[in-house]
Amino acid sequence: MYSTALEFDKDGKTTKVVLPSGKGLQYTCDTLGRNLSKTLSLDNSKSFIVSYGYKEGYAGSGTTMVSSIKNGISEIKYTYVSMERIETINNGKTIK
């Protein structure tokens, strides 16, 4: 029989998933509940990390708008028109 184990924080958000193979995902969130990082454990010595940054809101408040996604050595950055829609995406080249 195979089973997947899940762990949750006090707010019910998933913090860890362990697959039957022993590989797993670890989630890190900030106080607003936004994902800051996801770590995929491939085996005992290898892992893959994706980190997220968010656009600041009015007077330093938080938003759910992603400003960057970092994946190892690669990074994608986003700029927004006002607080509504993505204006540019930059992954080494600006995409409009």
Image: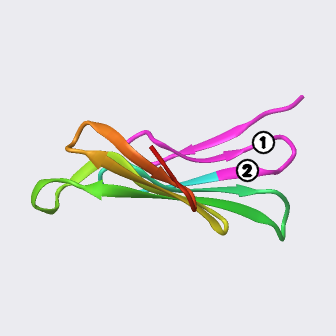
Viewer-nearest residue: 41 or 6? 41
- Callout 1: SS: loop
User: Which colour assignment does the render follow?
Assistant: rainbow
Q: Which residues are magenta?
A: 1-25
Type of the residue with mark 2: Gly
Please report the residue visible at 67 percent of the width from the left and 50 percent of the height from the top: 25
Residue 8 counted in the magenta span: yes
Kindly indicate the quadrant of the structure image that contains residue 1: top right
Task: Provide residue 52's location: percent of width, then percent of height.
Answer: 47, 57
Task: Provide residue 3's location: percent of width, then percent of height.
Answer: 79, 33
Please report the residue visible at 80 percent of the width from the left and 51 percent of the height from the top: 23
Type of the residue with mark 1: Leu
Kindly indicate the quadrant of the structure image that contains residue 60: bottom left
Task: Provide residue 69's location: percent of width, then percent of height.
Answer: 52, 56
Residue 24's mark? 2
Residue 32 in the figure: left or right of residue 29: left
Sooner in the amino-acid sequence: mark 2 or mark 1: 1
Location of mark 1 (residue): 19
Q: Residue furthest left?
A: 59
- Callout 2: SS: strand
Whether residues under marks 2 and 1 lie with C-beta atoms below 8 angstroms apart, the answer is: yes
Please report the residue visible at 43 percent of the width from the left and 39 percent of the height from the top: 12
Can see residue 30?
Answer: no
Please report the residue visible at 85 percent of the width from the left and 61 percent of the height from the top: 43
Residue 21 in the figure: left or right of residue 30: right
Can see residue 82?
Answer: yes
Residue 82 counted in the magenta span: no
CA separation in Å, label 2 and label 1 = 6 Å
Viewer-nearest residue: 58 or 79? 79
